[in-house]
Amino acid sequence: MIDLLRAVGRLFIVFLSHVGRLSVFAATALSHAVRPPFYPRLILRATIEIGYYSLPVVGLTAIFSGMVLALQSYTGFARFSAEGAVATVVVLSMTRELGPVLAGLMVAGRIGASMAAEIGTMRVTEQIDALQTLSTDPFKYLIAPRLLAGLLMLPLLVLVADVIGVFGGYLVAVYKLGFNPATYISRTWEYLEALDVISGLTKAAVFGFLISLMGCYHGYHSKGGAQGVGAATTNSVVSAAILILIFNYVITALYFGK
Amino acid sequence: MSHMPANRPPKIQLTDVHKAFGPKVVLDGIDLTVGRGESVVVIGGSGTGKSVMLKCVLGLLTPERGSILVDGKEVVGMRSRERTQVMQKFGMLFQGGALFDSLKVWENVAFGLIQGRKMPREQAHEIAVDKLSQVGLAPSAGDLWPSELSGGMQKRVSLARAIATNPEIIFFDEPTTGLDPIMADVINDLIVKCVKELGATALSITHDMASARKIADRIAMLYKGKLIWIGPADEIDRSGNPFVDQFIHGRAEGPIKMELRA
Ligand SMILES: Nc1ncnc2c1ncn2[C@@H]1O[C@H](COP(=O)(O)OP(=O)(O)OP(=O)(O)O)[C@@H](O)[C@H]1O
Ligand SMILES: [Mg+2]
């Protein structure tokens, strides 16, 4: 019994020390992100990497999610003759939940992993040490641009995902389920509120920040050789995915809890 | 240089520096002074902590105890912004090269000029090409990626990067390892030139005794976490220290037992 308590206590302390280190890391990175020198070239590069190159995968995820939403809610709601709600269900689910969460998870797999691998390789080959000896702060040069790009690009990606997802729902509703196009579109707009979209974009910004933070944090602290970099890559994706799901609940509760 | 204090402090001064990794003690009380414009070479067996010593001075590792002064200023525990300033004085050749693989060769060499000194890219490019030629590389090599170079070429690019900003203090971690004997001598001459003509202060690590004799004013030997012998380069053959004798003659027999199973 005592042993069990001791083990739990030890785990809790390890957990707290991780949270502490991560918070310090995030605060340091943020403080560097708002103080010069800035590296516009690098911010641009990270922006293109996260925003532009993630478009195909996020777009594909969104269109099929929208399509399956329409199909599922139609067959479900047909049981109590509420087929008219399909458009509303699609648009609310996409903007509030599926857009940000699915885009977040897909980008975590794509970007979080590549950031951790890139920065981790730089760590184990002493390139980060070399940066420091060349009077360049790695937090400013490597981490701040990625955090900014994540924070700014994910909301844009999610906005695109929202539109594509709704369009996917529209395609299925109109061409497969025989809805009237004009009615479907007006139904889509009817119950949609600004808050639905805004809450989704808030989530996206937080997720984008978390994805970059996890990628940079695990990469920056990777140890050993190729194996260490591999572990950092896995950890960054897993921890980003878990954090996305936790924060998704927290933000939903903050917006719609009452 | 209008005002010069009467007693100028040494360029680098290490006092009682200790560094351990967990239970493994690597540096166990290092005292070393490097004067202005002096070239000191540190020799010692593989894994004795030579690279760790340089990294402590550069602030890449933090010693548990002891003081490190650069131009009379304590650098242990210095804040990152101040450290960035102090780093402007340094050039460092890493043992493994540590070239940025996301940048072209010339951008690597020019990195300290463009990022550290805010020099325009065209001007930095010219200097980079000039430094590349000093280490025996053609301008066309500047447009390659580091991964397209041989190991020895990477080392030379790294050397060019270390001296690109004409730093006051240059650290060379095994500058001639992996080079052919002729190129090694070219690099030795280059290091001597940096010190003699440009007035830089150099702290180098090498296993190559010919190179050590050529570039060093003084030689220090690191063994079991301590500098067991420090003296002028031309006295190394008369050190009277059995450890030093064994090392410079490369004998397997002697007081230094290789810890083959450590
Ligand atoms: N980051 C680190 N973590 C743990 N141990 C380390 C670390 N860096 C160095 N060491 C240990 O410190 C000791 C000294 O390493 P160092 O790289 O300074 O050796 P060296 O004298 O430069 O050897 P070589 O001539 O082979 O380059 C080694 O035993 C190494 O295992
Ligand atoms: Mg070494």
Image (spheres, coloured by chain):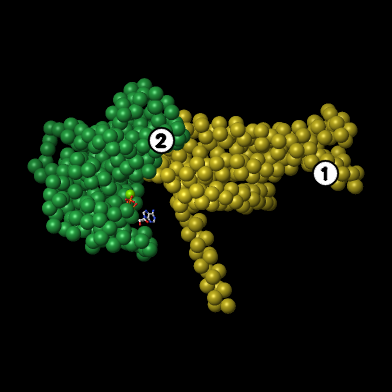
Chain colours: A yellow, B green
Looking at the rendered structure, which numbered label has been put on residue A72?
Answer: 1
Q: CA distance from mark 1 to mark 2?
A: 59 Å
Q: Position of residue A163 (x, y in %)?
A: 71, 33
Q: Are marks 1 and 2 in contact (CB under 8 Å)?
A: no
Question: Are there few (<14), some (14-19), or many (20+) residues within 10 Å of tag 1?
Answer: few
Indicate whether B77 appears above or below A208.
below
Q: Quadrant of residue B6?
A: top left
Q: Residue at horizontal 60%, vertical 41%?
A: A110
Q: Is residue B130 left or right of residue A127?
A: left
Can residue B64 be seen by looking at this rendering? no
Mark 1 belongs to which amino acid?
Gln
Q: Residue at horizontal 62%, vertical 35%?
A: A54
Mark 2 belongs to which amino acid?
Ser
Rendered-image quarter of ligand 1 = bottom left
Residue annotated with mark 2: B150
Instruction: Report the front residue among B3 and B164.
Output: B164
> Helix, strand or loop at disc 1?
helix
Indicate whether A61 appears above or below A246.
above
Instruction: Report the front residue among B239 and A34.
Output: B239
Q: Residue at horizontal 28%, vertical 28%?
A: B134
Q: Position of residue A63 (x, y in %)?
A: 74, 36
Q: Is residue A25 left or right of residue B129?
A: right
Question: Are there few (<14), some (14-19), or many (20+) residues within 10 Å of tag 2?
Answer: few
Q: Quadrant of residue A189?
A: top right
Question: From the viewer's perspective, is the residue at label 1 or at label 2 nearer?
Answer: 2
Quadrant of the drawing holding the C terminus of chain B: bottom left
